[in-house]
Amino acid sequence: MGETTMTLDATRSLQDLIDANPDLITYFRNETQAPHSRNRPGPSPVPAEFTNWRDEQKAWRETAVLFDQSHHMPELFLKGPDALKLLMKLGINGFSTFGPGKAKQYIACNPQGQVIGESVLQYLAEDSFELVSGMHLQDWVHYNAICGDYDVTVTRDLQTSANTEGRTFFRFGMDGPNAETIFQSVVEGAAPDIKFFNTAKVRIAGCEVMALRHGMAGHKGVELSGPYADGDKVRAALLEAGREHGLKQAGRLAYFSTPSEGGWLAYPVPAVYTSPELRGFREWVSADSWAGKAQLSGSFVGQSIEDYYLTPYDMGLGRLVKFDHDFIGREALEALADAPQRRKVTLVWNKADVATIQGSLYQAETPYKYLEMPVASYGFPQADEVCDQNGNLVGMSGFTGYSGNEAEQLSIAVVDAAYAETGTQVTIVWGEPDGGTAKAQVEKHRQFKVRATVAQAPYALAVQQMKRSGIGKTAA
């Protein structure tokens, strides 16, 4: 049985919430406040901008950028002789070469092969692991550790907004063409050559720091973590070393615009609400969990919450599925392996249509849905209809944002395979039906049909080149 330092609110479970709201889609579209919503109380420790988001975006393409990830990402620590056994039972990934000092993009599915969530999994030491980000998945791992027959202990370190005791670790992400030069210069002694998704311990400003090779912008980026009390000293050393190399600190706006270029389909609707086998989990996890705070937005309105579920193949993560061990969802994924029906793509918005949307703000009639920059998505998650030239629904679009590096409005979509070829013309329905939902951040507006062109995901040339060269090959 697992132990934990986290206190769960057992007064109302996710199952209680579902029972009280049989029309779950309407509830999630109108009544919830997302975990990272801008209208949640309390200021963020990370400013929206340090300078301006335009220059901060350019920094990861032209020089180097420093992100402060210390506050928005929860962490889970798993220890004990059965820790790896538990992770293998839940994870679709392969583990044959997984060992201390390595990391992977960890995915877990329900028995139907639909994604519950993903996280960065780090193998810290024998029988010791860390999950970084991915609250939906962390809750699922926690539940199985507590309720399964596993000799493990669980410790949770929640994001700052939900953490009354303060964060345990700082976490900085540094990326861009000059990031490796800065890393080499700031490390005391000889800096190690770290392979992608591997870790090494280094010293910076007299502090022990864990370095994870992990790039989002097509370069040899690095994620640095250590005791929270050391964060200011490490940050100061990085900024000093990066001064001559154009290192810029980036705020929330630039950070949350990275998926548009990089093609990361983050936080899909967790596939936990309907599976009969997951009822025990729904009765265990709080209604106040992230699964209970989904905030659906956009023009797509499903008939069932299952219409929003995705498989690893839909998300472009089929390469991570390894059928060399028994795991939850294996049978369903084996059946889907040879015939995935959807693919992840980038949609490049027609610039004239974008201008029309923005221009409607200066007209007398009700404007089209406001297209905020650099991140235009207004829910958690966003799902806009993607249609063919005849108006037939062929997919869902989300993570809409502006890339100054590409001078394009981009979104990440999952579309039917027949419409996934580069150059295919589709239409995105921008804005919610009936003038908008009751979400506080949604103004009264009109819908607009945006012409879009299908492109690769990731769209950014630098990221595509990185993946072709093998530098950014995601660890399985």
Image (tube, rainbow, N blue to C red):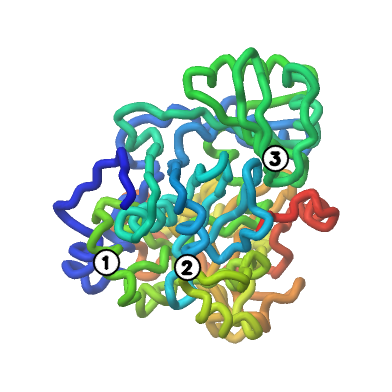
**Amino acid beneath label 2:** Cys
Distance from Cα at disc 1 to Cα at disc 3: 37 Å
Mark with earlier residue (3, 2): 2
Which residue shows up at 22% across the image and 73% down it?
Answer: 22
Residue type pointed to by label 3: Arg
Residue 21 in the image: state x and y as whole percent. 20, 68
Residue found farthest to the left: 11
**Number of the label disc, if any, that sits on residue 280:** 1
Which sits earlier in the primary sequence, circle 1 or circle 3?
Answer: 3
Q: Circle 3 is placed at which residue position?
A: 213
Disc 3, SS: strand
The residue shown at (55%, 85%) is 392
Find residue 411 and report its horizontal and vertical position in percent. Answer: 60, 60
Residue 286's x, y, as percent? 25, 54
Judge the density around disc 2: few (<14), some (14-19), many (≥20) Cα neighbours within 10 Å. Answer: many
Looking at the picture, does residue 388 appear above or below residue 1?
below
Q: Give me the residue at 73% from left, 17% from top.
A: 188
The answer for how far apart the CA atoms under marks 1 and 2 are is 16 Å
Q: For label 3, count other residues whose C-alpha is less than 10 Å away and answer few (under 14), some (14-19) or many (20+).
A: many
Quarter of the figure with residue 249: top right
Left or right of 185? Residue 337 is: left
Query: To which residue does mark 2 refer?
Result: 109
Residue 443 appears in the picture as rendered = no
Q: Give me the residue at 76% from left, 46% from top.
A: 218
For label 1, the SS is helix
- Is residue 11 rendered to the left or right of residue 276? left
Position of residue 314 relative to residue 213, above or below, is below
